[in-house]
Amino acid sequence: MRNPGPCILPLLLWVAIDLTQYCAGSHWLQTFNIVITEPGMSEPQFIQVGYVDSIQFQGFDSKAVSARMQPRAAWMEQEPPEYWEKQTAQILSLSRTGERVLKFIVTENGLRKKDYHTLQEVFGCNVANDGSFLGGQYRLAYHGYDYIILNEDLNSWTAKGKAAEKLKTDWENGDLAESWRTYLLGECVERLFRCLDLGRKTLLHSDAPKTHVTHQVRPEGNVTLRCWALGFYPADITLTWQRDGNNHTEDMELPDTRPAGDGTFQKWAAVVVPSGEELRYTCHVHHVGLPEPLTLKWEPPQTIPIMGILIGLVLGTLLVGTVVIFLVWKK
């Protein structure tokens, strides 16, 4: 496979961001497409990866030895050959559409066609465990920057820039929003539940987070308390800090949940507190893998007083000396 170079970073960034944006007690099916052109390439490269929650279940690469849709999860091997033939035909059609859109963007923005270009799109559906539809999305980006987005109502578009406005007009005239709405509410949901059925042992399990609190003294004298949650699945988790039993959000840092690289996730929440007041703060962790929410606090390291150590050494020396004298006397 040809090395896709700089495209990998924005693609992985999209994966890291989008795969963690679903609601508690729900599942996402998402598809990530990327079209790549670069100097010396005879024809664009087209890559697609499909995810259920954080698990990649299928993928396609036009530069692979076998340019066919391939299973990326063991449970997808249960699908019959007809499924993979249909998916391959669909992906080839999508690749041609993506190539046309990329050419449009390059032309409208007056860019050199032989330079490096990437077109990215992500689309998918979010469904609750009870089967209710929670939402869908479609985003098109050029070089990682949003270009045109399907709004939450799934009936209208938001465009970024003049060239994107022109594309938006073309899509509105072709009623493309209705086509995407039909897909997201129909085929996307059906495929999601099919995957959940095939991969239930992988997709419907839960791993409780491993938690702890770290303590770091800052240069200005105050302290950063960081509450860690590691190795959990699924990605839905809530980390909050309280001060004396009341919610505390001042000076709190809460980055996005991130994949750990082994199918689990990790997250932390940090607060800055006055030195000496650390024990007034507690971290609260909510996750489906926990039998009940956890409450954590920083535990100061246990220290033994110097006087106690000295007394212990003296007593130990006396005891050893007594034993030696007794053994010599007995001999």
Image (cartoon, grey):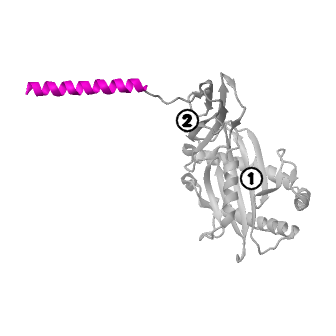
Q: Which residue is drawn at 62% across and 48% down?
A: 54
In the current view of this chain or complex, which residue is farthest to the top?
A: 244
Label 2, on which residue? 211
Q: Which of 30 and 163 is in front in this view?
A: 163
Image quadrant occupied by the N terminus: bottom right
Disc 1 on helix, strand or loop?
Answer: strand
At label 1, which amino acid type do we have?
Phe
Q: Mark 2 or mark 1: name the one nearer the start of the chain.
A: 1
At label 2, which amino acid type do we have?
Thr
Q: In this view, does 230 lie to the left or right of 32?
A: left
Q: Where is residue 96 in the image (x, y as percent from the top left)?
A: 76, 68
Q: Position of residue 153 (x, y in %)?
A: 84, 44
Q: Position of residue 20 (x, y in %)?
A: 67, 44
Q: Is residue 197 above or below residue 63?
A: above
Disc 2 on helix, strand or loop?
Answer: strand
In the image, the segment drawn in magenta is 305-331
Label 1, on which residue? 123
